């Protein structure tokens, strides 16, 4: 019976583990955090149907209730190498594990907004990331730096994505629709608050995303400004002033807001960078590289080593789940 080690208990890793375990295969699932699904658990609702993130977490955790799955919490895998016909992986405490196959599902990390100093994150009050905004929405506590309900909120797209200065030329895929979703959630909680979204261009990738975008304008009055914010700074009364250019009008623009939300993109996690480099499968921007994006997207150049989920590139949750299933099938079909 084939034995499998899966590194990363996110949506891709859990889905792959569940599929393999149902086929009677023993799976060791390693997660460096104290609990699985960290990048979902801190969300409020998920696009496009506004499903509660907590419900999705509960459903996915139930997939782990299989006797063939052994979940290792607080276990950071720092090394893996091929030894004969088996793979050896080693955690941060020096413990070694052996298996026939290894599946990397090490996911992503959010872009660190401190790197965009011109946007004032960590310098001025009232400037938050999309992750922090998600927590405000989740607990119905959307407030400005003074603890008051904001009268105006500005969302800025493409923070750390499609940006030469940060070194990330790629699109993170989910930021556009996340801003639309958060703006709708803002208006549902605070109907009188103005919501603005500054964008380069809006990329509504999936089914129902375009409908969400239209609904945000027609039903909730969200306003869209085509242009990037070049600078953000604090004001004497605790607000934030932004400088931008409206590229449709071709005019400079200044605006004050009670809350500036930076829509941060996805980057390869440190675990992804480290393990991909050590195994010779490091691709662009530190993500793991598969054999072929079309017909071999879960395969690597290393025998018995597979990859799935956002360790390869930015993915939505449903993309990652489907990719986890694909990886499980690839492992089952391998010789």
Image (tube, helix red, strand yellow):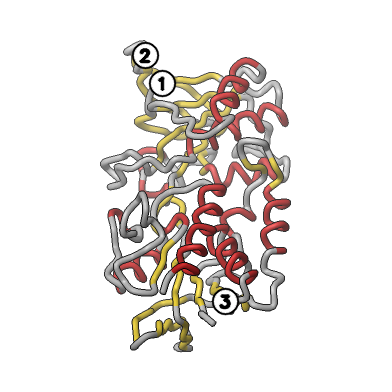
Q: Earlier in the sequence, mark 2 or mark 3?
A: 3
Q: Residue at x 62, y 17 (%)?
A: 221
As measured in the structure, the alpha-carbon distance from the residue carrying label 2 to the one carrying label 1 is: 6 Å
Under tag 1, what secondary structure? strand
Q: Give the SS element for disc 2.
A: loop
Q: Which residue is mark 2?
A: 248
Q: Name the residue located 62 percent from the left edge and 36 percent from the top edge.
A: 48
Residue 27, which numbered label?
3
- Residue 161 location, x and y as percent? 37, 42
- Return the x and y of residue 259 as percentages of the image width and height: 56, 33
Q: Could you give the CA–CA distance between mark 2 and mark 3, rounded to whole angstroms?
A: 54 Å
Residue at figure coordinates x 51%, y 67% from the top left? 8
Q: Is disc 2 surrounded by few (<14), some (14 to 19) or many (20+) residues within 10 Å?
A: few
Say what secondary structure mark 3 lies in: strand
Sequence-wise first label, 3 or 1: 3
Is 27 above or below relative to 17? below
Q: Nearer the viewer, residue 206 or 174?
A: 206
Specify the farthest residue to the top.
249
* Residue drawn 34% across the image and 17% down it: 247
95 or 152, which is in the foreground?
95
Q: Is residue 12 left or right of residue 121?
A: right
The residue to which callout 1 is attached is: 226
Where residue 245 appears, as percent x and y from the top left, is 35, 20
Which mark is first along the chain, 1 or 2?
1
Q: Nearer the viewer, mark 2 or mark 3?
A: 3
């Amino acid at each position: 019976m084939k034995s499998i080690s899966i590194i990363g208990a996110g949506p891709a890793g859990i889905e792959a583990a569940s599929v393999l375990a149902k086929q009677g295969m023993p799976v060791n699932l390693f997660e460096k955090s104290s609990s699985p699904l960290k990048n979902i658990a801190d969300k409020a609702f998920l696009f496009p149907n506004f499903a509660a993130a907590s419900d999705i977490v509960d459903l996915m955790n139930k997939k782990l209730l299989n006797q063939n799955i052994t979940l290792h919490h607080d276990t950071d895998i720092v090394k893996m190498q091929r030894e004969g016909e088996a793979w050896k992986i080693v955690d941060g405490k020096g413990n070694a594990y052996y298996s026939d196959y290894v599946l990397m599902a090490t996911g992503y990390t959010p872009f660190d907004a401190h790197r965009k100093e011109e946007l004032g994150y960590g310098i001025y009050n009232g400037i938050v990331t999309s992750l922090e905004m998600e927590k405000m929405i989740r607990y119905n506590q959307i407030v400005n730096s003074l603890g008051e309900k904001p009268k105006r909120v500005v969302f800025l797209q493409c923070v750390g994505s499609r940006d030469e200065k940060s070194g990330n030329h790629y699109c993170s895929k989910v930021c556009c629709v996340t801003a639309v979703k958060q703006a709708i959630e803002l208006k549902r909680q605070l109907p009188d608050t103005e919501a603005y979204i500054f964008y380069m261009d809006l990329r509504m990738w999936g089914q129902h995303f375009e409908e969400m975008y239209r609904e945000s304008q027609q039903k909730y009055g969200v306003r869209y400004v085509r242009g990037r914010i070049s600078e953000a700074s604090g004001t004497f009364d605790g607000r934030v002033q932004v400088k931008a250019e409206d590229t449709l009008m071709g005019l400079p623009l200044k605006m004050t807001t009670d809350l500036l939300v930076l829509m941060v993109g996805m980057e390869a996690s440190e675990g992804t960078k480290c393990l991909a480099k050590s195994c010779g499968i490091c691709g662009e921007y530190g993500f793991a590289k598969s054999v072929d994006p079309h017909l071999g997207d879960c395969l690597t150049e290393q025998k018995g080593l597979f990859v799935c989920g956002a360790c390869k590139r930015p993915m939505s949750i449903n993309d990652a789940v489907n990719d986890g299933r694909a990886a499980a099938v690839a492992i089952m079909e391998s010789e």
